[in-house]
Structure formats: C-alpha cells, structure tokens
Amino acid sequence: MGGGITLDHFLVLSLVIFSLGLFTVLTRRNAIGILMGVELILNSANINYLAFAFYGGGKYDGQIFAIFVIMLAAAEAVAIYQNFKTIDVGATETLSG
Amino acid sequence: MLAQAIFYALAALTVSSALMVAFSRNIVYSTFALLGAFMGVVGIYILLAADFVAMVQLLVYVGGILVLTIFAVMLTAGIADVTVSNRAVGTWSAIVTVGIAASVMLYAVMRTPWRQAASVTVLPTTYGIGNAFLGDYVLPFEVASLVLLAALIGAIVISRHEAKE
C-alpha cells in the first residue's frame, strides 16, 4: 500500500484493541460487559487476519478465516440473550426479597 | 499521504471508542461506544481491500450483535445503577497483567521479520471468496452453518423454558 502504511501499523493497532478488550474481560463483573470485551478481542484478531492476507499477497484464506470468526461471534449473541434473562430474574428476586 | 491520514483517523476512532468501552462507568455508554469501535474496524477492513468482509462485519456486528446487546442492556432492570451495571474490580492487577502481555506481544511484532509479498493486489474479493467457500472450505462452511442452527435452536429452548416458569 502506498502512503507509508506497513504491516506493523495494523499489527500495533490490533494489539492496542486486543489489550483494551483483555482489560475489559478481566475487570468487568457484568456478563454483558465481558462479552463486549470478547467482541473487541475477536475484532482485533480479524484485523490481524486481514492484514496478513493483504500484505501476504492477496490470497483469500485470511478473509475466509475472518468470516468464520464473525459467524461464530454471531452464535455468541445467544449467550447475551440468556444473560439478559438471568439478570432480569436476579433483579426480581432482589425486589421481592 | 491520504491513505496514511485515513488510517490514523480510523485508528483514532477505533481506539478511542475501545477506551470508552473499557473504562466507562456506565454500561450504556460502553454499549454505544462499541458502535464507534465496530465502524472504525469496518473502515480498517476497507483499507485492507477486504470489501466483502467489511460488509459482513457491518451486517452481522453492527446490524445484529450490537443491536442485540443494546436490547439486552436497555431491558435489564436497574441498569442505571453504576454499582450493578458496570462494576470494575481488580483494576490495577488487570493493568499490570495487560501491560505485561502487551509488551511481550509488541516485542514479538517488532522483532519478527514478517515475510511480505512484493506487491499487493487490490481486486474485488467476492468471486474468490465464493469459490473458496464452495470449494476448498466447503466442510468448515457446512459445520459453521450447523453451529448457527444449534445456536438458533438453543435460543428457542432457553426462551421457552423461561416462559413456562
């Protein structure tokens, strides 16, 4: 790519996003917050896949893996739904207790 | 220089949104900051000439996962109370852990001589990705669709179980 952007730029950006996602996962006590951190981590992994695919000669394997990661992240949304129910039930118990 | 300016603008958007996700005391702010992070990542994908993956990210992450997350946050009772909504524990030990992990990874990134192609090609990717999904990657593709079906059935089972009680 012209303009002086190298592979390292994308790798460092992905590293920063991964660190913030890991921090979110480690510090949150709320399951929805933890899942947000997991989504940041998955996005940083996808940036790595696409950067290697782009700078490695334009094969499609990296993009295929990124699409698989996005697919499995969509399946993870079920866990968010389950968590919403759980938190709701806990809140009603607190109110009635 | 234009590509560089675009890259740094997208990186600033993504990193500032991710900072807000990580450090905001209010989970509603965190959720909406996630929108900025996802949009910045979409821009990064386009910059990496991955047009199809960028659109998939826009549809699945922004249109699906983020909307579902906003629903889950908004429908949760007592979300305005910071102590229940987004309590953070062990901040300093987490900062130390993340700092060690990040410095190790940064060392690895900087020291490794990455093997790069001599020239990069920028072409529409849809044709090649479609061929790969129905060619070399047809078995993982079918397994992934099976996983999505299982998640769908699991969501139905969970919601029915809650409704009966």
Image (tube, rainbow, N blue to C red):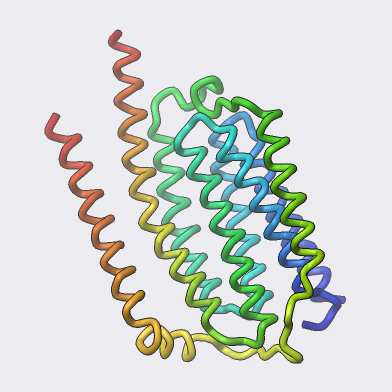
Quick check: A4 above or below A36? below
Percent x, y of residue A29 = 51, 29
User: Which residue lies at the image location 16% right of the left edge and 38% below the top edge?
Assistant: B161
Residue B88 horizontal/vertical position (percent):
59, 27
Corner quadrant of residue A25: top right
At which x and y percent is residue A81? 34, 43
Residue at (44%, 69%) from the top-left corner?
A68
Tell which of A81 and B33 is nearer to you.
A81
Residue B88 to residue B43: above or below: above
Q: Quadrant of residue A45?
A: bottom right
Q: From what the image shows, is residue B106 above or below residue B46?
A: above
Q: Nearer the viewer, residue A14 or A86?
A: A14
> Residue sitting at 55 percent across and 23 percent down?
B82
Image coordinates of residue B123 in percent, x first then y, are 61, 90
Q: Residue at x 50, y 58 (%)?
A: B62
Q: Is residue A29 left or right of residue A2?
A: left
Of all residues shown, which one is farthest toward the left?
B164
Q: How many marks?
A: 0
Quarter of the C terminus of chain B within the rendering: top left
Image quadrant assignment for residue A4:
bottom right
Q: Quadrant of the N terminus of chain B?
A: bottom right
Q: Which residue of the protein is positioned furthest toward the top in this rendering?
A: A97
Residue B21 appears left or right of B4: left
